[in-house]
Image: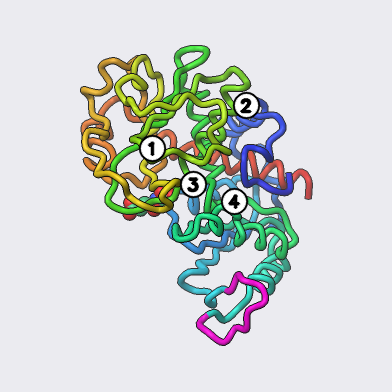
Amino acid sequence: MKLFSSVKDINDLKQLVNEALELKKDPYGFQNLGKNKTLGLVFLNPSLRTRLSTQKAALNLGMNVMVMNMDKDGWALETRDGVVMNGTTVEHIREAAAVMGEYCDILGLRSFPKLEDRTEDYSENLFRKFVKFCGVPVVSLESATLHPLQSLADLITIQEQKQTVKPKVVLSWAPHVKSLPQAVPNSFSEWMCRAQQEGLVDFVITHPEGYELAEEFTAGASITYNQEEALENADFIYVKNWSSYREYGKILSEGEGWMIDNKKLESSNNAQIMHCLPVRRDLELSSEILDGPNSLVIKEAGNRVWAAQVVLKKMLEKL
Ligand code: SN0
């Protein structure tokens, strides 16, 4: 594998998940694969789980890891072409990416959308340029529109924890006070639609009117504004806030009544609750859920290691 940015980069989804679960049983079986190979992790935005789980995955494979906090320690990056750089940006992504490609065998990049210009964010301009100019395989550590390592960990968690052959998985919008990216829900939907095609899950999305995700990521999902109906018989409920795609980057409603608590689980199939974290307690998700027996969020975060490790393994095998 030379690029991991979307479920579209995966040929055999079931095989990938099974291999990740095999790595979980035997984390150090491929220590020689990464020997003398260097992974560079480049952050333009904050990260806890992605940063640590990807480092851990690389160490398990015997790799060396370098981390660059571009937002704090790097030069201000220019990503546009054809501009005279007489303003605040100091270094062009053409040079910055190419130089990091000289030092690393594989690179990871995290960059959030600005949530100002939808066309610009959804063009994935920054991520694509980084891939083009660095010249080495690239793992997305969350881009403007997708977060594939998170979604792979989510699918691994569902496959690992499911009690029925084909669980009902519901993506449920949650309230928040800030405008958040659509990357996590877009990505989760993209991966679940593919998993549904392959007979692994039934997938439903529920959100208030106006929060429709981009259709390119939701083809095949059942979509309803009625949360109560969506949660009926649910086996997994994936909770996440996102800002509007239609009225780009806007918060359209306070989301009164959308937070999941134990009462809302009564009609579900004793649903297990997932969230990518970080989560704002008692705003996005109730404390009683997070501290109770139905929460999967810590195991889900733990599985980020095996998602990263299987992807790095596939890249190392093709170097
Ligand atoms: C990010 C998001 O895309 O929603 C990262 C998730 C992995 N989350 C946030 O930015 C949360 C910020 C906040 O203030 O709660």
Marks 4, 3: nearer the viewer: 3
Check if mark 2's residue and mark 1's residue have beta carbons within 8 Å: no
Residue highlighted by disc 1: 275
Check if mark 4's residue and mark 3's residue have beta carbons within 8 Å: no
Q: Amino acid at mark 2?
A: Asn
Residue 224, x across and y down, in percent: 39, 26
Magenta-drawn stretch contains 86: yes
The reply, left or right, for residue 176 in relation to residue 88 is left
Instruction: Tell me if residue 88 comes above or below residue 123 in the rendering.
Output: below
The span from disc 3 to disc 2 (Cα, nearest Å) is 25 Å
Q: Is mark 3 within 8 Å of ligand 1?
A: yes
Q: Is mark 4 within 8 Å of ligand 1?
A: no
Q: Compare marks 1 and 4 and give the one earlier in the sequence.
A: 4
Kindly identify the residue that appears in the image at 71 percent across and 53 percent down.
137
Q: Secondary structure at mark 2?
A: helix
Residue highlighted by disc 3: 183
Residue highlighted by disc 4: 140
Q: Amino acid at mark 3?
A: Ala
Residue highlighted by disc 2: 18
The reply, left or right, for residue 299 in relation to residue 63 is left
Crowd rating for badge 4 (residues with CA inside 10 Å; few <14, some 14–19, many 20+): many
Q: Who is closer to the viewer here, 245 or 100?
A: 245
Q: Amino acid at mark 4?
A: Ser
Q: Compare marks 3 and 2 and give the one earlier in the sequence.
A: 2
Toward which corner of the image does residue 308 lie, by quadrant?
Answer: top right
Q: Compare marks 3 and 1 and give the one earlier in the sequence.
A: 3
Instruction: Tell me if residue 42 comes above or below residue 175 in the rendering.
Output: below
Q: Secondary structure at mark 3?
A: helix
